[in-house]
Amino acid sequence: MTVNTQKVLKVLLGRMPDGERIPDALTCGVYGGRVTSLTGLPSGTLFPLLERLLNAGWVERHWEADESAEAARRPRRRFYKLTARGAELAPQALAEASAGRPLYGRRPAGAPGLAGGGR
């Protein structure tokens, strides 16, 4: 698992880089621009990574309601949140990655970012 994937998973699990909690990350999700600002990843790195997580079944996405965006006078935001499967597997994958264990051959089934990491 790449360092960038780890950064994104931590944010989607509701953890800021400084350890603070991100309110509603697990229930409502985090919009793409916020993930970019919290991880420091450019959009050209972040959005392909999110697509891999989507394809692996770890993440889902949705658009915010038009009314919310109109009330704030800004474009709609696209939110990303962990699926039940992602919420179950991400902490295990992060623990293995931080322990320095090789994930190849031992990773959770369908781990994103690695060969054969589909559903």
Image (tube, helix red, strand yellow):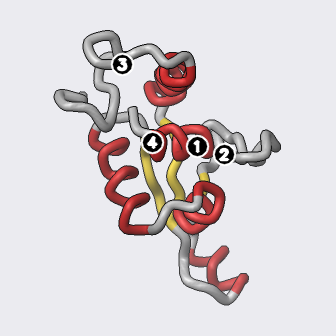
Residue 103: which numbered mark, if any? 3
For badge 2, the amino acid type reads Ala
* Sequence-first tag of 2 and 1: 1
* Sequence-first tag of 4 and 3: 4
Give the CA distance from mark 4 to mark 1.
Answer: 11 Å
Q: Position of residue 2 (x, y in %)?
A: 41, 38
Q: Which residue is mark 1?
A: 12
* Sequence-first tag of 2 and 3: 2
The answer to the question of whether label 1 and label 3 lie on touching residues, with beta carbons closer than 8 A, is: no
Instruction: For label 2, count other residues whose C-alpha is less than 10 Å away and answer few (under 14), some (14-19) or many (20+).
Output: some
Marks 2, 1: nearer the viewer? 1
Q: Nearer the viewer, residue 84 or 14?
A: 14
Instruction: For label 3, count other residues whose C-alpha is less than 10 Å away and answer few (under 14), some (14-19) or many (20+).
Output: some
Residue 5: which numbered mark, if any? 4
Marks 1, 3: nearer the viewer? 3
Q: Quadrant of residue 19?
A: top right
Which residue in the rendered view is the most extreme toward the left?
Answer: 116
Q: Which residue is mark 2?
A: 25
The answer to the question of whether label 2 and label 1 lie on touching residues, with beta carbons closer than 8 A, is: yes
